[in-house]
């Protein structure tokens, strides 16, 4: 049975999240296991656009360089308009979890599509509520999933970049006696 563990770091700014990504990349972490979620809090004040250029999504606006770089580096990208949160940009495997939740019409008691995707990844509901609040208040979520050893390595790296918070979510493999 494969392990599904995750670390979630919350950053105050996109620069902080970008530093976290760069440090993980420098340490040789698998970028295909990394997701980032955030929004441009000033979309009403700037010209913002999104378009798909073959296998890559493009974004321009206040944080265009930030998001454009991630969409080339991480696996998957999307833009969602989430009621109560606003326009949200997502890059990485979390996109697939969100789409699966939307396609399956998963409704998780008062949570957004982002929350349903996080639940699908194995993040506990109480933590999901905290992460949705972070997004509502213009914070950025950076997460990595993998084995416990990979998550522990990522935690040490991310904590050196001074996020607001970090949390490890260990899998609970049913019937496998894991943790």
Image (cartoon, rainbow, N blue to C red):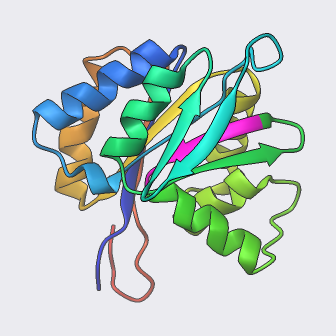
Q: Position of residue 94 (x, y in %)?
A: 52, 57
Is residue 122 rendered to the left or right of residue 150? right
Q: Quadrant of the C terminus?
A: bottom left
Residue 119 visible in image: no
Question: From what the image shows, is residue 90 above or below residue 173?
Answer: above
Q: Position of residue 144 (x, y in %)?
A: 36, 48
Is residue 4 rendered to the left or right of residue 79? left
Is residue 119 located in the magenta-colored stretch of the structure? Answer: no
Figure disc tally: 0
**What residue sits 36% from the left and 59% below the top?**
5
Question: From what the image shows, is residue 142 above or below residue 75?
Answer: above
Is residue 74 rendered to the left or right of residue 92? left
Q: Position of residue 98 (x, y in %)?
A: 64, 62
Quadrant of residue 86 in the image? top right
Q: Quadrant of the N terminus?
A: bottom left
Question: From what the image shows, is residue 24 above or below residue 61?
Answer: below
Q: Is 30 or 11 nearer to us in this picture?
A: 30
Q: Which residues are magenta?
A: 87-92
Question: From what the image shows, is residue 52 above or below residue 65?
Answer: below
Is residue 168 rendered to the left or right of residue 32? right
Q: Position of residue 83 (x, y in %)?
A: 89, 44
Predominant SS along the magenta part = strand
Q: Is 169 or 158 nearer to us in this picture?
A: 158
Q: Is 148 or 93 nearer to us in this picture?
A: 93
Quadrant of residue 88 in the image? top right
Instruction: Looking at this view, name the residue that lies furthest to the front.
Output: 53
Residue 60 visible in image: yes
**What residue sits 37% from the left and 67% below the top?**
4
């Amino acid at each position: 049975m494969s392990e599904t563990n995750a670390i979630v770091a919350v950053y105050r700014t996109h620069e902080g999240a970008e530093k976290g990504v760069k440090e993980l990349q420098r340490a040789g972490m698998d970028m295909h296991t990394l997701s980032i979620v955030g929004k441009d809090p000033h979309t009403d004040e700037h010209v913002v656009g999104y378009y798909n250029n073959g296998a890559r999504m493009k974004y321009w606006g206040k944080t265009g360089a930030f998001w454009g770089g991630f969409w080339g580096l991480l696996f998957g990208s999307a833009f969602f308009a989430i009621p109560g949160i606003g326009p949200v940009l997502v890059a990485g495997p979390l996109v697939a979890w969100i789409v699966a939740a939307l396609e399956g019409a998963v409704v998780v008691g008062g949570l957004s599509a982002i929350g349903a995707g996080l639940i699908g990844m194995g993040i506990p509901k109480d933590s999901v509520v905290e992460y949705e609040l972070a997004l509502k208040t213009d914070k950025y979520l950076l997460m990595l999933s993998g084995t416990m050893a990979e998550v522990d390595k990522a935690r040490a790296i991310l904590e050196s970049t001074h996020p607001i918070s970090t949390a490890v979510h260990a899998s609970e493999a049913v019937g496998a006696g894991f943790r």
